Amino acid sequence: MKIAVVGTGYVGLVTGTCLADLGNEVVCVDIDEEKIKSLNKGIIPIYEPGLDGLVANNKKAGRLEFTSDLKKSIKECGVVFICVGTPPKENGEADLSYVENVARAIAEAMDSYKVIVEKSTVPVETGEKVARTIRAYNVHKADFDVVSNPEFLREGSAVNDFMHPDRVVIGCENERSRNVMKELYSPLNAPIIFTDIKSAEIIKHASNSFLAAKISFINAIANICELAGADIEKVSEGMGFDKRIGRSFLNAGIGYGGSCFPKDVDAFVRIAEKFGYDFRLLKAVQEINNAQRDNFMKKIEKALWVVKGKTIGVLGLAFKPNTDDMRLAPSIDIISQLQKEGAKIKAYDPEAMQKAGQIFNGITYCNSPYEAAAGSDALVILTEWKEFKELDLKRIKPLMKHPLIIDGRNIYNPEEMRKEGFVYISIGRKEVL
Ligand code: UDX
Ligand code: UDX
């Protein structure tokens, strides 16, 4: 099949590349000409494991190309994926102006039947609005169908998530578009859930909100564990073995970040409000998530007593491991607050330091976790990179001014930390003093 993927961000680039790898001819389109130039030179603008090799292979095989010529791409392709950003507006609603612009451009260019697929996360009823926009600007009176096919790609494992999904959700409203989508996804051998468009749109917001709720739930339980002197890791394990609950997304920490959960939860609260429903449960999910960062700051302040003038080594800047993405990373709030209180920050992240450089001022970036630890009054762990779990703690301890580790991701065993002689403060577990 010939496919155009509009928007080559985290989602569009992975989607386009994987569709090419399944044997389709894919053209990835982006308004950002610099990005297209780089991609054509083989430079991948994001860090996503496995993606660079897949892009190179499919380019070489002639199945994948990059362009900023939207008009030509639309004319040549039968299926068009919309993967442009849907960033939050100030009131929490999704800004759909990029989606509208692309819908209009598709309508003006198309001169034969197209299946137009919304891949970006959008509020329910966007499918209808996209169809209305396309009808309004459909100068060649071409046939078309709109389909909703939400993405469930976790950064850091997006290629694997595309190739081995738990399910593919397709919201479509006639046989013609259903057959096209069925053919497209049949090589994956994954369960396909066909629904109407509105239900597919809600599946996306409901899934991300449910996962966010799981995280806030376990963070709330972590707070109770701290007060009661219990151990959140044991509690998560004990709960997670129940198949109805499941162990994943039960890791307590410094709260969820990234370009999806915070924005999608906010957007879903607003969507519900517009329909006249007060989604109090999700509002509590947001509140708990925000409070989790403040709780972590309090732990740092309590452990250091005076923050002003202290040197703090920070391990991990990205919002999660295996990505360089800094969008709404908890590290932004935590580091900014520490700087405001007069701390000196030495930071290390295996992939995100370049992007972090565009956000923070006055941070010393280090070449290794050991360099970040050297001369620090405390080491603060904000992202659970595998590399940090495997640190040589015997080497770290003498490098630090004080052997104090405040761990926002619970990557070490408190008993072992005691044996190694660290003061170790983590989430939802007893402090090792
Ligand atoms: C996208 C969606 O924004 C989000 O709703 C969904 O939940 C995840 O996927 P992402 O791929 O991370 O997010 O977005 P981003 O990295 O911002 O990439 C969007 C791309 O679209 C950019 O490269 C941008 O240049 C491009 N774009 C934007 C266009 O090509 N045309 C436009 O009109 C606007
Ligand atoms: C999410 C969705 O999972 C994915 O399906 C798609 O819709 C895009 O958005 P992503 O944001 O890339 O993926 O990462 P995810 O693994 O979901 O983590 C999101 C945030 O939750 C991270 O900040 C992570 O640290 C946090 N998290 C995750 C926890 O705090 N605890 C957990 O147990 C799991």
Image (cartoon, rainbow, N blue to C red):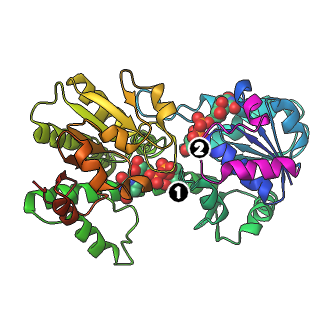
- Residue found at the very far bottom of the displayed protein: 242
Give the quadrant of ligand 1: top right
Residue 409 at x, y percent in the picture: 31, 53
Which of the image's four quarters has the N terminus?
A: bottom right
Establish whether ligand 1 lies closer than 8 Å to the Cβ of label 2.
no
Q: What are the residue bounds of the magenta stretch?
A: 36-61
Q: Which mark is residue 234?
A: none
Judging from the image, what secondary structure is the residue with disc 2 in?
loop
Q: Residues within 10 Å of mark 2 (few under 14, many from 20)?
A: some
Q: Read off the residue under disc 1.
A: 203
**Disc 2 designates what residue?**
47
Seen at 21% across and 23% down, the residue is 342
Q: Quadrant of residue 332?
A: top left
Q: Is residue 343 above or below residue 272?
A: above
Report the residue at 28% width, 41% height from top. 290
199 vs 300, left or right, is: right
